[in-house]
Image: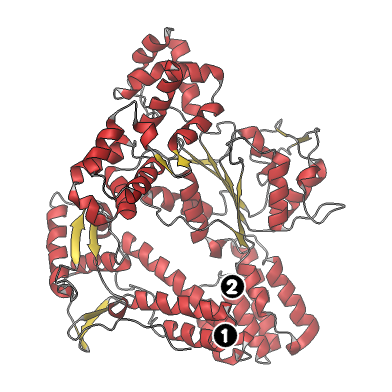
Amino acid sequence: MIRPPARPAPAGAVYFSLLGPLTAVRDGRPLPLGPRKQRLVLATLLARPNTPVPVDVLTDAVWPDDPPRTARKNLQVYVSAARALLGSDSRDGRDRVVHGCGGYRLTIDEGELDTLRFRSLARAGRAAGERGDLRAAARLLREALDLWEGPPLNDLRDSTGVAEEAERLEARCLTVYEDWAETEIELGRAAVAVDGLRDLVERHPLRERLRVAWMNSLHQSGRQAEALAVYDDYRQLLARELGLEPSPAMAALYRAMLGRGRAARPAAAGREAAHGTALPAAPRDFTGRREELRELLALLGSPDERVVVVSGPAGSGKSALALRAAHLLGDGFPDGRFHVRVRREDGSARTPAEVLGELGRLCGVRVPGGSGVPAESAVTAASTVPTDSAVPADATVPAVSQGAADAWQRWLALHRALIVLDDVPDEAFVRGLLPRSGPSSVVLTARGQLAGLAPVHRIALGALADGEALELLGKLIGPGRLRTDPAAALRIVRACGALPLAVGVGGMRLAVLRHLPLAEYADRLGDPSAALDELVAGDISVRLRMASGWQDLSADDRRALGRLAGPAQEGGFTLDGAMEALGCGERAAIRTVESLIDAGAVTSPAGEVTAHAALYEVPRLLCLYAREREEG
């Protein structure tokens, strides 16, 4: 099999490298890249090739703490320097760096950037491996690794923004190295990988998949004592640093090496240790939420945080954020990452026993008398949650048998896994599913705040910023069409309440209705009586999502939200406005508004402010739905 074709860079074109220090060469000669801030801008654009990079991302990369008032003007200067360095596109003569609603976009080909070439070779190598052509897989993966010259962007990592991009690139390189090493072991050529694996383990001592590959390569090279020592050293390191044990797959590999000698070649065990996942595909159009994603990744990377609640109104992108984090955290959860939806397609909640049954089948939890935790294990009796859990001592586990609950807790205590429970209706539903001890973590997504769970960490999502919402719209309809009428595009995303679901549905609708001017669609969405009718794309309906959230509210909260929808749609409401709309006194109004906040139907200011000074808001589309119900 030959390497995948790449369009060669034309003579005189610049070739950039990020897989090491930032460098650029033209016709074999290195090029000066200017002062440090200019290189930071160039590195950030190159790290996200052919994708709009928001201005605030570039600003954070250059001035992470206190950007000057002239930041935007300075960025324009640095981008102009990048344009001059890149030259025009040989195909159409246009600038290689353009500015649109989503930010600055750098257009570059695979033959001009090492990370694009790396990605192409890695993809081709994995495809060859999946076909069973291991020799071609090893060759292609090795070609990719030959582009890796050291820690990516190691000369610019004092910038937090660039450091994040560099760590993402390094994680990708490490994964490809692991793929290559495992392939060489499968081919019986383990010795070629030994030294490189040792060096990488020294730099990344807690990365289990590297350790497993190193163990295997030593073992297959006849160095059994050294292979067993790798396991012992890792076990002691985990116990000392994190209070954990190696994964069951790695422990099984160790026992196999002890018992069977060099004849064993359990390379697949290393993959099993790193690839126990049951996640939907990563959301391709994930946009924005940079701070929230950073916070979620940091929380899940901490051994002290076992439960994180991601809350927000319907359509705010809670599931997308949780899945994005889960896909980025494979190395931190060697025993797997698992996603389970708590609701059925019609929006009704499943039973806790059904959810526990699915978790059991995914994770291989065994209970007395069965091979997993079946859905039929539900019983009407409830079991008391021990007082060392992260929930109240008198809480109960509804409709789950004691044996099934205990088996699940034993599994959690012995494994480091990430569980995403998506679209949780209330606290009682999940209390028995949360880890009481051990290294596993759970992410709960919910419209409400799940205030009855404590202690947990909470991340609340609201609307996207205008720039993020426009970037999402541009991904769906194309940046060129977005540029035809930026003002109308802004009206569209604001009429969608800047909620990812609504912006996504509107974008999908516009992608089909290519003849429809953006201004006309903005007018349709601006009409309160027609907006929800317009936000339908195939079988995806924003109105149906709002209806599901509406059903979660109590009858009293529905009535209150219907009365508050009018003043809320006019720019929010104060406590005095709530008292007038509800026809009640101050104390009753406060209780009602706070009940709606708990349910995720009303948002309040992020900082501390008195009840009378606060301005409360309801997402625009929920307002429209509530008014429909009130008038109907």
343, 75: nearer the viewer: 343
**SS of the residue under disc 1:** loop
Nearest the eye: 429 or 569? 569
Q: CA distance from mark 2 to mark 1?
A: 22 Å
Amino acid type at circle 2 is: Arg
Tell me, for residue 209, which label it has, or none: 2
Q: Check disc 1 and report the residue beneath it.
A: 133
Residue shown at the point (16%, 51%) measured from the top left? 68
Counting from the top left corner in percent of width and height, residue 319 is at 50, 47
Q: How many marks?
A: 2
Q: On the picture, is 6 further left or further right than 207?
A: left
Specify the quadrant of the image occupied by residue 579: top left
Classify mark 2: helix, strand or loop. Answer: helix
Q: Is residue 606 left or right of residue 245?
A: left
Crowd band around label 1 with a 10 angstrom C-alpha radius: few (<14), some (14–19), many (20+)? some
- Upstream in sequence: badge 2 or badge 1: 1
Q: Residues within 10 Å of mark 2 (few under 14, many from 20)?
A: many
Instruction: Classify residue 388 by image quadrant.
Output: top right
Q: Nearer the viewer, residue 349 or 196?
A: 349
Say left or right for 46 vs 623: left
Residue plotted at (78% across, 54% down):
372
What x and y, as percent, mark residue 464? Answer: 34, 42
Residue 483 visible in the displayed image? yes
- Mark 2 vs mark 1, foreground winner is 1
* Position of 174 relative to 438 (above/below): below
- Is residue 388 in view from this perspective? no
